[in-house]
Amino acid sequence: MDYKKLKSFPETFLWGASTSAYQCEGAWDEDGKGKSVKDAAAIFPGTSDWKVTSDHYHRFREDIALFAEMGLREYRFSISWPRIMPDGVTENSKGIAHYHEVIDECLKYGIEPVITLYHFDLPMALQEKYGGWESRQCIDDFEAYARVCFREYGNKTKYFLTINEQNMMVLFNKKRLTDFRLVMQENHHMLVASARAAIACHAMAKNAKIAPAPNITAIYPETDKPEDVLAAMDFDQFRNRLFLDPMVFGTYPEALEAWMRDSGVFPDVTEQDRRDLREGKADFIAFNYYGAGCVKYMPKDSKVKSIDEMKSMSDFMTGLMCFPGIAESVENRNQEHTSNGMGIDPIGLRTTLRQLWERYHLPLLITENGCGVPDTLTDDNRVHDDYRIDYLKKHIQACREAITDGVDLMGYSPWSAIDLVSTHQGISKRYGFIYVNRDEFDLKDMARIKKDSFYWYQKVIFSNGADLE
């Protein structure tokens, strides 16, 4: 739909930016913090580990002052479970105190903290003790951890997010190729854990709201063939609705549940689980968006490469996006790409916003959307990132169009507030408005340098989205 005049962004719109603990904090073993599964994971060759990252743990006051200068109205960050509970169950007073300081620093500048409870960094102790999310015990331990966060921060924080990109942990879990049902059981445990956290939040933090934070995207059919159109509908259930329907409606998507039961991969679900899912409903939906997906029909008898046959990262990623009997992910030939190969599809963001609003009718918060590419620091200590400005401008325009369509969009919090260590490409894949002066292995002086996008976003925020030039 084209309009003669677009609506303005609401005066209460939450202009923000995001980070996660393991990617920016560093201080991986300081002040009693336990090891996380990310600390123990093998890093990609030629990329940094998680020991120092952006050193946000020690420099958060400096960083938050810069966020305030940029004009942020909210800062979405994650709490590190193993910093709060080094072994996953025992409280660490220094870790608890640290996040009080971070929240208080945000509030000092009028920045609304949006707290993610879990962003990939499970305490390693729980992984070693019982296999992490494979065990139902992880539901109880996550709820206990969440209750500590609500007890400590619930009177200061209006917005909590449960689990970041749960669907990415499921879609890109190599165990799915050998034991699909086990991965669906892990996913179910995370869904119930999120519901339990929502129940606890509503009981303990009366003024707070809570939401899931999956990675959501519109799914296009590769062609107009009826089987591809149906495949896109089916893949939407697995890619998106599996992670939202339980948190909003308390139930699995109907067709997907039927398919999983027919395929023998539906998880064990107790009556208590069903009660928890019905009671622990989300107040809003947070989601990350980096470009739309595209699929074609994949017959049930199609062959998928085994792990042993996958010789490259490309083979691995392609194999994990094949679902015989549902769909196979394919390249969207109509989509532009960044220099790092990431999709650029602002219309897809508008489409995604529309689909989410029209299905769930809950307020929406974009918690990640960004342009991750190498940046060049010039001799005069500047970063000219016009490519990032162009990317963000198009997506913010799509947000305004969706608001005009009738979508209740609470805010926009792109990835990332400062440069941080990306999971697969290290510090070289930069997203931030603020440059951190280090490379993969040389920490240099870790100076904070405002990119051109910093000043551009500052202008956007101060004009409440009216000035995108």
Image: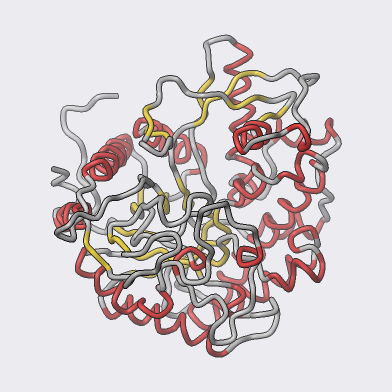
Residue 322 position, x and y percent, is: 68, 29
In terms of depth relative to the viewer, which is nearer, 334 or 265? 334
**Residue 461 shows in this picture:** no
Where is residue 229 drawn, in percent x and y?
57, 17
Q: Nearer the viewer, residue 76 or 379?
A: 379
Q: x, y percentage for residue 26? A: 48, 72
Q: Quadrant of the N terminus?
A: top left
- Quarter holding residue 148: bottom right
Side of 15 where 350 appears, left or right: right
Residue drawn at x 74%, y 23% as measured from the top left = 325
Out of 101 and 252, give the one closest to the viewer: 101
Judge left or right: residue 170 versus residue 264: left
| Horizontal relation, residue 214 to residue 125: left or right | left
Give the residue displayed 40% in from the left and 20% down from the top: 334
Residue 397 spot, x, y in % from top left: 25, 38
Q: Is residue 220 visible?
A: yes
Q: Residue at x 57, y 64 (%)?
A: 118
Q: Is 96 above or below relative to 460?
A: below
Dividing the picture into quadrants, the one containing residue 197 is bottom right
Which quadrant would residue 63 be assigned to in this image?
Answer: bottom left
The residue most toward the top is 225
The answer to whether 132 is drawn above or below residue 216 in the figure is below
The quarter in which the C terminus is drawn is top left
